[in-house]
Image (spheres, helix red, strand yellow):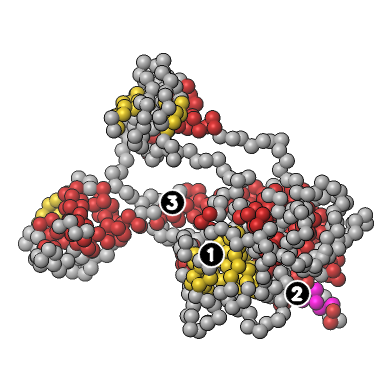
């Protein structure tokens, strides 16, 4: 990459090697060549980057289905369309779309490695983060007069508190303005790391009064541990020989679903093919991925690479990102494999909410001539409305991103929606239908996306209706009237209107943006809940942020203390600086009370380790084990002994001694 130098006073970025324009400022501009990294005042850098940022076009169309300019949809045949993509309420002026079958000559591409997959969606990527210096605590306590905006700091001459600094690096002289405010008189900050109490806005929202003060919540810790266990899970190859040891560039396969029988003939109702799912590790980046295998699918050509590349560019918080698609014969037959991001601990919406057979009793009793039971209510057989709206916001956000990219989801089904944590949703298996049903005879692979996008809205309506009834029986045609009565009695009119709008055929092309007025202010409720959740997690992170540093200190102390021999000297750990560190170890862990019982105090250990790491001038008394010697040293002396001794060990390990 080309190196640049930044003209501080005339606000220019000039490539190295080009002739710089002479500045009228008497201080002058930078030298003609930059030979090394330069510490640049970020105020000037931000001024340049702000001028280059592109702002979104407010007049641009945010949601226009590709190929959907006509009022009527073209007739298409598709035999394996899911039941979640057919309209339940028909508009009198619109006929139901016809179905179609798989055309021969389907194709797919052996996509590139996940390493080459885009990391962010081009249409929705945030603005580049501005570089900044490490924050200084004094910066947050300066007077208002000293906290001017970046633009004012650049356009105005340096004030009395700002000094033009001069620095020479590698023979090149740089001039920059030091905008770091001087600390106020009387400000005192600790010179070692300390643990602070919880922030008030988090402390008062804690649901449990006995929540741990120095460690993260047990519930969050257990969830993270479970995810780690699932991520590291492996199989015994001798017990499951049907799973190959390696597939393309992936190894350590672990089945995430029960494997289908070897001679199974029945195909799945979703894709029309037998499928299986595995967790695997990519040997190129050593990251875990989810592999979705399509059994017995043979590729013909790579024309559908266009759609695969479009899916790989989409990254959204409610969509499982597709990384690559490839073919393999590692399973003993032609197979098509889709590689997705792996989200440990996820379960399908089907298993989370529709795994109770008794939930269908309200719709099935009438079939057996029985009387209706008690009407289900919220929190007593039905899901709370707040949870349903949380799901609606996430699923509609995923559909909006997919439709804006000119694609269609086509897998809006409870069996293909992952639930992680309590309410986090992700749409899984995207792009599979686009490959399996790809028609080579179509000149434009996006020509039918408008129809598929309308089917996505119908599928979303069926998912919402099933959630509102807490039963998949509610979306059957014979139970629709009863299901809508249940929704009318238990939920708001906005939820009812949203379901009716999504499930009713319209004489115009609909958009997922049309349901935003029905969501209304509930969107802000979900945003507030997400931000409060972020505050809680940040507070838990703050409790653990120092643990890694303290562990490194203890690990270094452990390599020094009680070492039997070093450089053929058996008394090495008992002499010189090492003896001080041994006594400090006893001061940390081996203190006793007046009665001779062990004195256990975690705060004492943490406080002493923090002071050692910072090297504070505080003095402590170290007593030998025979209590005949007392050494008074400072933490700064101990830190010097500690660093010198550990560097001696490092030098010996590297063969430098």
**Quick check: 428 left or right of 469?**
left
Residue 555 among those drawn in magenta: no
**Is 486 above or below relative to 535?**
below
**Quick check: 41 left or right of 106?**
left
The residue under label 2 is 360
Q: Earlier in the sequence, mark 3 or mark 2?
A: 3
Residue 526 is marked as none
Q: 644 or 625, which is in the foreground?
A: 644
What separation in Å lies between label 1 and label 2 (alpha carbons)? 36 Å
Pinpoint residue 290: horizontal percent, then vertical percent: 56, 66
Displayed quadrant of residue 57: top right
Asked if marks 3 and 2 touch (Cβ < 8 Å), the reply is: no
User: Between tags 1 and 2, which lies in front?
Assistant: 1
**Is 290 above or below relative to 606?**
below
Q: Which residue appears at 58% of the width and 73% of the height?
A: 329
Residue 198 is marked as 3
**Quick check: 42 left or right of 346?**
left
Residue 289 is marked as 1
User: Between tags 3 and 2, which lies in front?
Assistant: 2
Pinpoint residue 62: horizontal percent, then vertical percent: 71, 43
**Which quarter of the rendered picture does the C terminus lie within?**
bottom left
**Which quarter of the rendered picture does the N terminus lie within?**
top left
Please tell me how crowded label 3 is: few (under 14), some (14-19), or many (20+) other residues with Cα within 10 Å: some
Q: 303 or 170, which is in the foreground?
A: 303
Q: Which residue appears at 24% of the width and 52% of the height?
A: 612
């Amino acid at each position: 990459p080309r190196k640049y130098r930044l003209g501080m006073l005339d606000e220019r970025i000039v490539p190295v090697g080009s002739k710089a324009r002479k500045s009228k400022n008497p201080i002058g501009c930078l030298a003609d060549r930059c030979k090394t990294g330069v510490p640049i005042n970020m105020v000037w850098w931000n001024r340049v980057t702000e001028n280059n940022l592109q702002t979104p076009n407010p007049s641009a169309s945010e949601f226009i289905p590709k190929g959907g300019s006509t009022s009527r949809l073209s007739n298409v045949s598709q035999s394996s369309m899911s039941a979640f993509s057919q309209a339940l309420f028909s508009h009198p002026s619109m006929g139901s779309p016809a179905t179609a079958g798989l055309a021969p000559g389907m194709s797919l591409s052996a996509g590139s490695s996940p390493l080459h997959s885009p990391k962010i969606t081009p249409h929705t990527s945030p603005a580049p983060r501005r570089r900044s210096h490490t924050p200084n605590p004094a910066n947050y306590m300066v007077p208002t007069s000293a906290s001017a905006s970046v633009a004012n700091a650049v356009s105005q001459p340096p004030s009395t508190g700002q000094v033009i600094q001069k620095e020479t690096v590698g023979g090149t002289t740089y001039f920059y303005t030091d905008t770091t405010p001087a600390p106020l008189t009387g400000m005192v900050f600790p010179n070692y790391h300390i643990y602070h109490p919880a922030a008030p806005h988090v402390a008062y929202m804690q649901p449990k009064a006995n929540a741990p003060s120095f460690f993260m919540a047990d519930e969050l810790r257990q969830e993270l541990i479970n995810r780690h266990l699932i991520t590291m899970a492996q199989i015994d190859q001798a017990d499951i020989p049907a799973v190959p040891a390696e597939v393309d560039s992936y190894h350590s396969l672990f089945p995430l679903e029960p494997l289908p029988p070897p001679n199974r003939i029945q195909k799945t109702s979703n894709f029309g093919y037998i499928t299986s799912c595995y967790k695997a590790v990519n040997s190129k980046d050593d990251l875990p991925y989810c592999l979705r295998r399509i059994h017995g699918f043979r590729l013909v050509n790579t024309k559908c690479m266009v759609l695969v590349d479009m899916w790989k560019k989409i990254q959204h918080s409610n969509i499982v990102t597709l990384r690559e698609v490839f073919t393999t014969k590692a399973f003993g037959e032609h197979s098509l494999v889709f590689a997705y991001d792996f989200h440990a601990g996820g379960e399908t919406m089907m298993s989370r909410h529709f795994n109770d057979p008794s939930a269908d009793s309200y719709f099935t009793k009438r079939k057996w001539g029985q009387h209706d039971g008690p009407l289900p209510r919220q929190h007593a057989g039905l899901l709370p409305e707040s949870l349903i709206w949380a799901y609606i916001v996430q699923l509609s956000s995923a559909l909006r991103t997919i439709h804006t990219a000119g694609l269609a989801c086509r897998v809006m089904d409870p069996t293909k929606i992952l639930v992680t944590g309590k309410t986090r949703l992700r749409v899984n298996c995207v792009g599979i239908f686009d490959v399996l049903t790809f028609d080579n005879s179509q000149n434009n692979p996006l020509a039918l996306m408008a129809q598929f996008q309308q089917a996505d809205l119908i599928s979303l309506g069926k998912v919402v209706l099933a959630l509102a009834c807490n039963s998949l029986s509610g979306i059957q045609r014979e139970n629709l009237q009863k299901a809508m009565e249940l929704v009318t009695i238990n939920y708001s009119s906005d939820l009812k209107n949203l379901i009716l709008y999504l499930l009713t055929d319209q004489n115009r092309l609909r958009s997922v943006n049309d349901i935003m007025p029905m969501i209304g202010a509930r969107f802000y409720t979900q945003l507030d809940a997400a931000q409060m959740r972020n505050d809680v997690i940040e507070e838990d992170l703050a409790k653990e942020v120092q643990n890694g540093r303290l562990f490194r200190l203890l690990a270094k102390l452990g390599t020094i203390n009680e070492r039997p021999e070093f450089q053929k000297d058996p008394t090495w750990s008992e002499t010189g600086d090492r003896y001080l560190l041994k006594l400090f170890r006893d001061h940390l862990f081996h203190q006793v009370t007046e009665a001779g019982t062990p004195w256990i105090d975690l705060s004492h250990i943490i406080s002493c380790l923090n002071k050692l790491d910072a090297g504070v001038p505080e003095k402590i008394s170290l007593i030998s084990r025979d209590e005949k010697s007392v050494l008074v040293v400072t933490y700064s002396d101990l830190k010097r002994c500690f660093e010198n001794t550990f560097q001696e060990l490092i030098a010996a390990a590297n063969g430098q001694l």
